[in-house]
Amino acid sequence: MGRVTVRSPVQPDIGSWPLWPIVLMSGALTVGMIAIATQFRPIADDYIHIGRVMQLGVLPSTTDWFMTFLPGFFGVLLISLFTSLYGSVPDSLAYVPYAFFLVAVLYTVGLTVLFPFTRSLRATTPWLLALATPPLWLLSMGNLFPEYDIINTFGMMSWISNGYRAHLPLLILIFFFWMNCWRGSRLVGFTVGLFGMVFLTLNFLNALPDIAAYFALAIGTASYYAWQRTRRPGSTNTPVIAVNLGIAVGALAGLAILLLSPGTTSRTDEIPVQFSLESAIETIPYQLVVFLREMMNISHALVFVAAISIGITAARISGAPIERNGLSRLKTMALQATALTFLVLGTGVIGETLTYAAIFHRWVVLQIEFVAILLVGLWIGALVGLRNPRSTTQRWAYVVTVGVLLAALVPLVNVANFAAERKRTWESGQPAPVSYMVDREQLMLLDWWKAIEERRGAVR
């Protein structure tokens, strides 16, 4: 396998440089993210899911939602599983498992984006460097300045019934990237892609326009590789074409199940879709500006710099440069994530013409944007590391990475303080809403809270 050539023949002994400053800082911040969850308390729709699970049980509650309001069976099942812990464990631990789950998804994102480096790294290095992903996500979402982005981040980490808008796009992207490494049977690849995407699509709570973005990404990728195959008949991308076609068909099949389910019929009867061309023409430009404003976060620049620094480190830390096909793979992933960012931006804006405007509808775009920033940064960093193999370049990469991770302490502390303040208010019996996330002073939620308290009292 060919190697990317570098300008200088100098091969400094940077493979012996320790990763412990990055690992310790990343690990401490990640533990802090999970520890914050001890301060989380129910809010908004979580009251309803907790109450229904207490009354009906996990599977009956999920089935009832599927029949009456929420057709995304596997998404509701996940919500039911996590909310079932409330009342079964101490309140301070009830939200910890979901925070751990989100962190695990983010860590897997880190392993996925570092995969192109694996052949030139020691086996343990990607596992260690991936620890930086959860803190960088916290910095990207939470920003350096309260309070607006802190509220967003608080919602992503503590609002189980809407958490799918944070973890699901990441899971779909992880699945997409790993399936695009498929080199086995075309039939098996098509089948795995199809059923895997059906499962993931049924994690949406209802039929959303965002599903079209993932369909378009898969079709676009398959079309590109098919076109490439016509130019190079000996291309080895034939299995990947089948995989992406399977993912595209799976997205359509999952969407059809969502649309044809009894839950969708009941939902549209209760909340009719209100769409008019006139209102859409007015809504789309406004929402496009709003979405773009959500994406303009000063901390993204810091995350981008950190990704470049990690790319430099990963490109040279083993003493052997990243292989040419690894660099090409990294570039392809960066282009795909960037394209998906614009696709979900478009489908998200269109979605605002079908329902009420809400900040959490924009969370999906922020997740994909975060991955795109990581990948583009890693690709640039790999190029810089290959063309500048001097020890000073490596040294600055370490310093910058640790410095950016230190900056992640700001949103960590801000979210912790925000959660603790809300906990004190909540436990005092006062209303403790968080912006668009309403609390038990809402009549419907108050009724559910009373039912939860009665149920907990009976159990005690």
Image (spheres, rainbow, N blue to C red):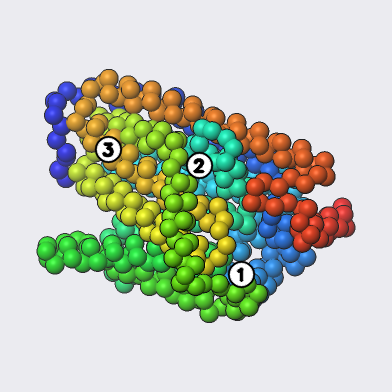
| Vertical arrangement, residue 357 with respect to residue 411, above or below | below
Horizontal and vertical percent position of residue 442: 76, 56
Alpha carbon distance from label 3 to label 1: 42 Å
Which residue is under mark 3?
380
Q: Which of marks 3 and 1 is nearer the N terminus?
A: 1
Alpha carbon distance from label 1 to label 2: 27 Å
| Vertical arrangement, residue 275 with respect to residue 428, above or below | below
Which residue is more in the foreground, 75 or 104?
Answer: 75
Q: Which amino acid does label 3 sit on?
A: Ile
Which residue is more in the foreground, 42 or 244?
Answer: 42
Whether residues under marks 1 and 2 lie with C-beta atoms below 8 angstroms apart, the answer is: no
Q: Is mark 2 on a helix, strand or loop?
A: helix
Could you tell me which residue is drawn at 47 percent across and 70 percent down?
Answer: 278
- Most extreme residue toward the top, as rendered? 392
Q: Which of marks 3 and 2 is nearer the N terminus?
A: 2
Q: Is mark 1 on a helix, strand or loop?
A: loop
Could you tell me which residue is drawn at 50 percent across and 62 percent down?
Answer: 352
Whether residues under marks 3 and 1 lie with C-beta atoms below 8 angstroms apart, the answer is: no
Which residue is under mark 2?
141
Which residue is under mark 1?
70
Mark 1, other Cα within 10 Å: few <14 / some 14–19 / many ≥20: many
| Vertical arrangement, residue 216 with respect to residue 91, above or below | below
Q: In this view, does 381 lie to the left or right of 230?
A: right
Q: What residue type is labelled 2?
A: Met
